[in-house]
Image (cartoon, rainbow, N blue to C red):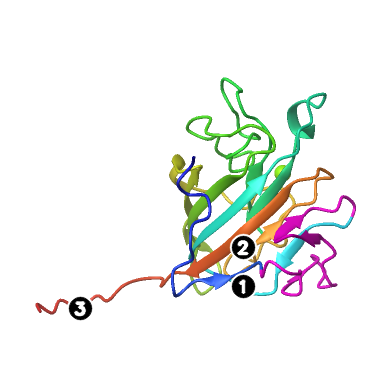
Amino acid sequence: MISTLGACPPENAQLLFNNVDVSNWTKRGGEPAEWKVEDGVLHVVPGKKDIMTKSRFRDFFLHLEFRCPDMPEATAQKKGNSGVFLQGRYEIQVLDSSGWASPGKADCGAVYNQFAPLENACAPAMQWQTYDIIFRAPRCNESNAVVEAARLTVLLNGIVIQNNVQLAGVTGAPLDEKVEEPGPILLQDHSDLVCYRNIWITPLAEKGSDTYEPH
Ligand code: MG
């Protein structure tokens, strides 16, 4: 039993998936989302395109659960592929790479084509798995140039697989490259029958107080 499954959102969290429908999600172009919801589970419908939240975020803590289909004949990037795009710009890969000796920069838990996971924490197909992601948006100056890179930490099934990595920039097929702006959480339709549930987010303050007041 993996303890992060079924994690309860804290009081200040926002539910991104309401367990009933996709009314607070759209396609990339803003059209209504068309993924299927059954028994509180959100299903990719192949061909119905990526979906993203109507809400936009800067720094956040995100929890979600996913399940890859069993595709024993499929290999590499064709095996239970989906993805979680932070701000619609930075993909954390979803893939059935369970059991692979040395997952690379395109396998489950990778920051797509930038950072491989530190270890393989991916559970077998058809098992529910968790992502817990802490994201710090890039800091930009008045000209929208990045002065501090985006950073993120990822736990897969409770195991740290990305440790405060600094991103070189957006990953492939981003929603846009306006990295100075807040962005949605986007889930990828890569034509495989991946499912999601228990998706919630806690926006984070961009900094704490800078005063020193002994109490
Ligand atoms: Mg993907």
Residue drawn at x 76%, y 33% is: 70
| Residue extending farthest top | 101
Q: Which amino acid does label 3 sit on?
A: Thr
- Residue 119 is situated, as x and y percent measured from the top left of the image, at 49, 30
Q: Does the magenta stretch include residue 171?
A: no
Q: Which of 45 and 154 is in front in this view?
A: 45
Q: Are marks 2 and 3 in contact (CB under 8 Å)?
A: no
User: What separation in Å lies between label 1 and label 2 (alpha carbons)?
Assistant: 7 Å
User: What separation in Å lies between label 2 and label 3 (alpha carbons)?
Assistant: 31 Å
Q: Which mark is residue 56?
A: 1
Along the polypeptide, which appears first: circle 1 or circle 3?
Answer: 1
Q: Residue 72 carries which label?
A: none
Residue 143 quadrant: bottom right
Identify the secondary structure beneath mark 2.
loop
Q: What residue type is labelled 1?
A: Arg
Q: Are marks 1 and 2 in contact (CB under 8 Å)?
A: yes
Depth-wise, is mark 1 or mark 3 nearer the camera?
1
Residue drawn at x 59%, y 27% is: 103
Residue identifier under label 3:
211
Ligand 1 occupies quarter: top right
Q: Nearer the viewer, residue 150 or 116?
A: 116
| Residue numbers of the magenta segment | 18-47
- Per the picture, the main secondary structure of the magenta-coloured stretch is loop
Residue identifier under label 2:
87
Residue drawn at x 82%, y 67% is: 33
Q: Are marks 1 and 3 in contact (CB under 8 Å)?
A: no
Q: Residues within 10 Å of mark 3 (few under 14, many from 20)?
A: few
